[in-house]
Image (cartoon, rainbow, N blue to C red):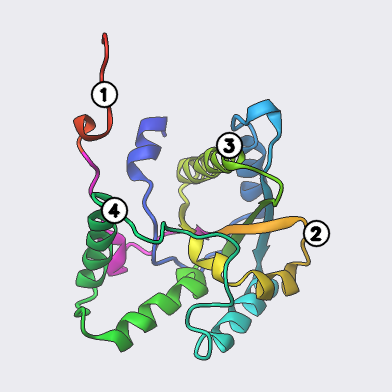
Amino acid sequence: MRVSEAVLSRISCRGFRSDPVPGETLRDILRLARQAPSGGNLQPWHVYAVAGRRLQAIVDDVLARLPEQPHGEGGEYRVYPEHLKEPYRSRRFKCGEDLYALLNIERTDKARRRLQFRENFCLFGAPLGLFIYLDRQMQPGQWADVGMFLQNVMLLARERGLHTCPQEAWAMWPKTIAAHLAPPPELMLFCGVAVGYMDPDHPLNALRTERAALEEFCTFIGT
């Protein structure tokens, strides 16, 4: 698969088959993904790759707490700005509306929307979860480095016939997840990534979010 094909076929998959991801395939992806650039070669990413009973224990624990704590236990960073301005606000709103439309869930149907949100913490059925941490000392430059590492992971997964879904929703549960993974206290949970084989029949896997035209985000000078 060409890089451009991996880029174009990568989506945030929200419906996986239960087939396990081979361990050597996962290790191969992560070995190659570490070639991502990072300022000063800090390589600030820390990955906990979890499957099987250990992953199910995390899922069960979060799902048990979710009814009483629908907003989680408090992430250690703000995923979105408090007052999201345009055009970002409209883009986020449309992404959500397009997603729920595929499930025929009306905006007023809060109960069904909550049930769908709950699927985040089942990793949409994926058999493998990656929990991504970085040192609390790190600054925005290193967060960007982690993003490049994650993009490598997602594109390499596509090359191997896998799909992924990066999930910042997991950042809502840092204490619960830490109780299972026991990361060093200096590490902060950034996100989770669901990894597995796509269920092609799941309606949400038809979602293709829109992208801004080139002229909307790029200013050409002398080219």
What residue is pinned by disc 4?
85
Visible residue check, residue 2: no
Q: CA distance from mark 3 to mark 1?
A: 23 Å
Q: CA distance from mark 2 to mark 4?
A: 36 Å
What residue is pinned by disc 1?
219
- Marking on residue 184: 2
- Residue 66 is left or right of residue 138, and the answer is left
Visible residue check, residue 214: yes
The stretch of residues the image draws in magenta is 193-212
Instruction: Tell me the kind of residue under disc 1.
Output: Thr
- Residue 45 is left or right of residue 116, and the answer is right
Residue found at x 65% / y 36%: 34
Q: CA distance from mark 3 to mark 2?
A: 22 Å
> Is 66 or 136 nearer to us in this picture?
136
Of marks 2 and 1, which one's residue comes earlier in the chain?
A: 2
Of marks 3 and 2, which one's residue comes earlier in the chain?
A: 3
- Residue 62 is left or right of residue 70, and the answer is right
Q: CA distance from mark 1 to mark 4?
A: 21 Å
Local SS, label 2: loop
